[in-house]
Amino acid sequence: MAWFSRKDKNISPDVVKKDIPGGLWSKCPSCSEIQYKPELEKNSYVCQHCQHHFRMTPEIYFDLLIDSASKKDLFTEISSTDTLDFVAEKKYSDQLKKAIEKTGKSDAISCAEGKINGKKVVLGVMNFSFIGGSMGSAVGEIISRCIDMAGKNKLPFILICSSGGARMQESALSLMQLAKTSSKLARFHRNGGLYIPLLTDPTTGGVTASFGMLGDVILAEPGALIGFAGPRVIKQTIGENLPEGFQTSEFLLEKGFVDHIVTRDEMKSKISSIIDFFS
Ligand SMILES: [Zn+2]
């Protein structure tokens, strides 16, 4: 037993254990290696042991992609309201308030105009920390305005997706965003606009069923979960085991749903060369 061996080894119980400062370490959910957060940050939140891409906030994506001093935030004043007075386990109005406090953002997407290697773009980044990156009326409206703005100014529109799907607390108001954003993108495409979605972990539900899959070139981060319904639901519905790697970026690339997998170190140069190619 532990206390006998401690006595045998003559280890004094009075030895003070060294405290590891809280908040400085992070465990990789893929390989379980402990990561020193400042190192992880330097490596764009990619695990040095297994290359797992950790989830990132919109700010870090903006820093990674947008040329310094060229960023201008867009549509920061738009946020969802609780039109239905929706109450499930929690009140939706409370959830919204908490998410705004936690993230400092008005809703689950941040958008900006800026330059990628000198080329002006409109860039949207969804935020999984804001009610699971769910798409409510505000997210749909912001994306629609970004598409309009990119169309009017003849700029490419890049959207980094990360979402659990439609925001059920908004019911049909959320679901109509699928049709709204899809029809905006169809018009944008007809007028020669370039749209590049980049799917990150996880991109699921209504986002996959609409703007997530409507790009001219569809990019994905390695190992991201991308799908409509989750694997457990599909397994139960079809009553069969699912193939290995089902619903990962690599699986979707093999099946032709995704065009390229891009790691964070090459993300900016890849997007930049795609824009060059299309212009
Ligand atoms: Zn790892």
Image (tube, rainbow, N blue to C red):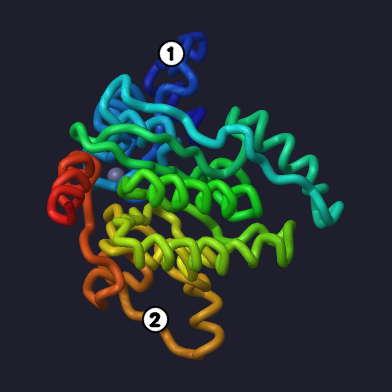
Relative to 197, say whether 228 is above or below.
Answer: below
Q: Quadrant of residue 66?
A: top left
Kind of element beneath mark 2: loop
Residue at the spot 57% in from the left edge and 54% down from the top edge? 140
**Can residue 78 be seen in the rendering of this structure?**
yes
Of the pair 156 and 215, the residue shown nearer to us? 156
**Could you tell me how far apart the alpha carbons at marks 2 and 1 are, in whole angstroms?**
46 Å
Tell me: is circle 2 under 8 Å from ligand 1. Answer: no
| Numbered circles on residues, count | 2
Return the residue at label 2. 242
Kind of element beneath mark 1: loop
Tell me: is circle 1 under 8 Å from ligand 1. Answer: no
Q: Is residue 273 left or right of residue 65?
A: left
Relative to 233, say whether 128 is above or below.
Answer: above
Residue mark closest to the camera, 2 vs 1? 2
Q: Are marks 2 and 1 in contact (CB under 8 Å)?
A: no
Return the residue at label 1. 18
**Image spot of residue 191 (x, y percent):** 34, 62
**Image spot of residue 115 (x, y percent):** 28, 33
Q: Quadrant of ligand 1?
A: top left
Residue at the spot 24% in from the left edge and 36% down from the top edge? 116
Look at label 2 and name its amino acid: Leu
**Image spot of residue 226 (x, y percent):** 40, 64
**Image spot of residue 178 (x, y percent):** 56, 66
Q: Earlier in the sequence, mark 2 or mark 1?
A: 1
Look at label 1 and name its amino acid: Lys
Of the pair 47 and 106, the residue shown nearer to us? 106
